[in-house]
Amino acid sequence: MKRHLIPVLLAAFVLAACTGKKEEETAAPAAATEAPADDAATLAAAEAAAKASADPNAAAAPADAAAAPAAPVDPAPAAADGAIPGLKLGVDYEMIKGGQPFEPLAGKIEVVEVFNYVCPACASFQPLVVSWKKTLAPDVRFTYVPAAFGGNWDQFVRSFYAAQTMGILEKAHERTYDAIHLENRLKGERGDDSDADIAAFYAQFGVDAKQFAGNMKSFAVTGKFNKARQYIIQQQANSTPTLIINGKYRVTGRTWEDRLRIADAIIAHERMRSVAPATP
């Protein structure tokens, strides 16, 4: 089946992000869903919520709530960076207090997508991201950061980085979504995939399955896993997919297309700031 069919086949998830909200908390007031101050508590909540949100029997979120983050946080004041023309703080984007880029910018504008292969919303968003990436200027660096929300989410974080370290990520990335959401070769959000199951899938890209499974738990992959995990905690990215620009701006918006429009505006803003003369 073709990737362009994903939005049709996953219609129930097209606008519903995979969030960090527990099922029993869905009726609680917004104040009760604030992210805990303790990193471990934050991650524990995200892990439990990810499992709940990945339940294929759970009701899809209503369209009006689709782009809302799972756990609202108070945005940092925008005064330091100024308003972004054409965008509204708190509606189109949030400022991340103390946010940092995933990698040193080194003259680039960084766009991070926090995602996971098991997330149906990410699978719906991915075809748009693929097309959008082709329009980005050379000064923009796009980086996927997989979300470790516990359970099989963590296994697919490890598979992402194992594929990266073994040089097959570019070939395997789109196909991993297909295997879960179109072909049912991997269970993803529908159940548990063993390391051996996942490695057997990746073997088609020219690697040894046993070696791939071993690399999923290797020192190098564990280091990358921990870096991604800490970044997501620091950036308070408790739903997927989430776009973060230069470690400072978390894109919101109400549709996938709207998020990409907002991202374009923020990229343009950051580009202008980088060339503007310093204020005396």
Image (tube, helix red, strand yellow):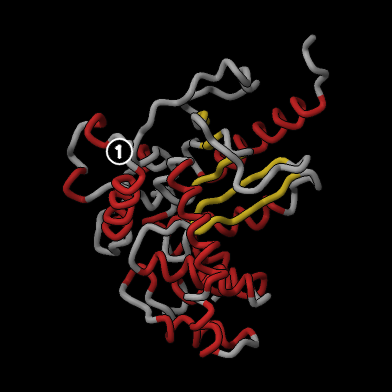
Q: What element carries label 1?
A: loop
- Direction from residue 7 to residue 168 in the image, left or right: right
Q: Could you tell me the amino acid type at mark 1?
A: Pro
Specify whether residue 2 is in view.
Answer: no
The picture quadrant where one finds residue 203 is bottom right
236 w.r.t. 73: above or below: below
Q: Residue at x 74, y 54 (%)?
A: 134
Spot occupied by residue 230 in the image (x, y as percentages of width and height) = 47, 50
Q: Residue at x 78, y 40 (%)?
A: 107
Q: Residue furthest front?
A: 219
- Direction from residue 250 to residue 150 in the image, left or right: left
Spot occupied by residue 241 in the image (x, y as percentages of width and height) = 48, 50
- Direction from residue 271 to residue 101 in the image, left or right: left
- Tell me the quadrant of the picture where the C terminus can be found: top right
Q: Quick one: label 1, few (<14), some, or many (20+) residues within 10 Å?
A: few
Q: Residue at x 81, y 47 (%)?
A: 138
Closest to the observer: 7 or 116?
116
Spot occupied by residue 231 in the image (x, y as percentages of width and height) = 50, 48
Spot occupied by residue 50 in the image (x, y as percentages of width and height) = 33, 56
Count up the numbered dots: 1
245 w.r.t. 193: above or below: above
Specify whether residue 37 is in view.
Answer: yes
- Tell me the quadrant of the picture where the N terminus can be found: bottom right
Closest to the observer: 1 or 73?
73
Q: Mark 1 sits on what residue?
A: 36
- Direction from residue 130 to residue 196 in the image, left or right: left
Q: Which residue is drawn at 74% across and 45% down?
A: 140
